[in-house]
Image (cartoon, rainbow, N blue to C red):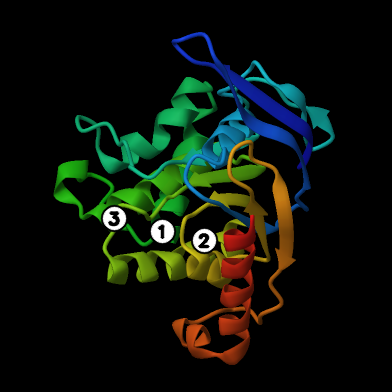
Amino acid sequence: MLIEGITKTFETASGDTVQALRRVDLAIADGQFASVIGSSGCGKTTLMRIIAGLELDYGGRVTIGGRAHSGPSRDIGIVFQEANLLPWRTILDNVMLPAEVLKLERKAALERARWLISLVGLSGFEGRYPSELSGGMRQRAAIARALVHDPAVLLMDEPFGALDALTRETMNLELLKIWAAAKKTVFMITHSISEAVFMSDRVIVMTPRPGRVVDDVTIDLPRPRTLDLMSERQFGEYTRKLRRRLNEA
């Protein structure tokens, strides 16, 4: 995935203009796990919405799989902070929703949906409704839904921000297992420096508005990762370095 010169300006209700992003350039390798951190309002979510094709009026170019990308695409799967499952549909039916919208062959899509439900640890819950699941389980279902149409890139906007600390740690581990099995490129926004270091191959630091990339740190920590890694000296060095860069930005 190639992001070249992305610039975005909004017009306020009073007629003023606000520059959200200024010439953001990034190249994310296939299968890489990259996280973006930055202060609130720095344009992280705007950048993700541009990549997702949900913002169309911007400068620059996004290329995925060698093709220029504009507008919603089958190449993209998205997970938001809230699972946003449809309450009247079962977990299986929620996971199947993108396949139905894209009119994918139903038998193959059902097979993939059931495999993904098993992958995210929800086997046996296919017929349950969202209200019968915990917050963490609903978010697992949202991840399965985002992957059911086999996108090249998975975008995640604070996917575990609404969960308690213990559930969030568990979901971090689960997401790494899913990522290793699904072999997708992941682009995740988070406010947690430690989460970014723990999950990622790279952590991208953005400045306050107008957002631009001020640092791009390679995380050279062994995989698979366990929670014990957070007590290691090198882990602490990465978090301190990134915190300094955020404070300097």
Residue sitting at x 38%, y 70%: 169
Q: Would you call the spot at circle 2 few (<14 residues within 10 Å), some (14-19), or many (20 or more)? A: some
Question: Picture coordinates of residue 110 (x, y %)?
Answer: 44, 39
Pick the front one: 11 or 32:
11
Q: Would you call the spot at circle 1 few (<14 residues within 10 Å), some (14-19), or many (20 or more)? A: many
| Residue under numbered circle 3 | 137
121 with respect to 119 (left or right): left
Q: Are marks 3 and 1 in contact (CB under 8 Å)?
A: no
Residue sitting at x 50%, y 70%: 194
Q: Are marks 1 and 2 in contact (CB under 8 Å)?
A: yes
- The type of residue carrying mark 3 is Met
Question: Picture coordinates of residue 164 (x, y %)?
Answer: 26, 63
Q: Quadrant of residue 151?
A: top right
| Residue under numbered circle 2 | 178
For the view shown, which residue lies furthest in the right direction?
66
- The type of residue carrying mark 1 is Val
| Residue under numbered circle 1 | 120
Would you place residue 218 above or below residue 72 in this image? below
- Residue 74 seen in this snapshot: no
State which tag comes first along the sequence, 1 or 2: 1
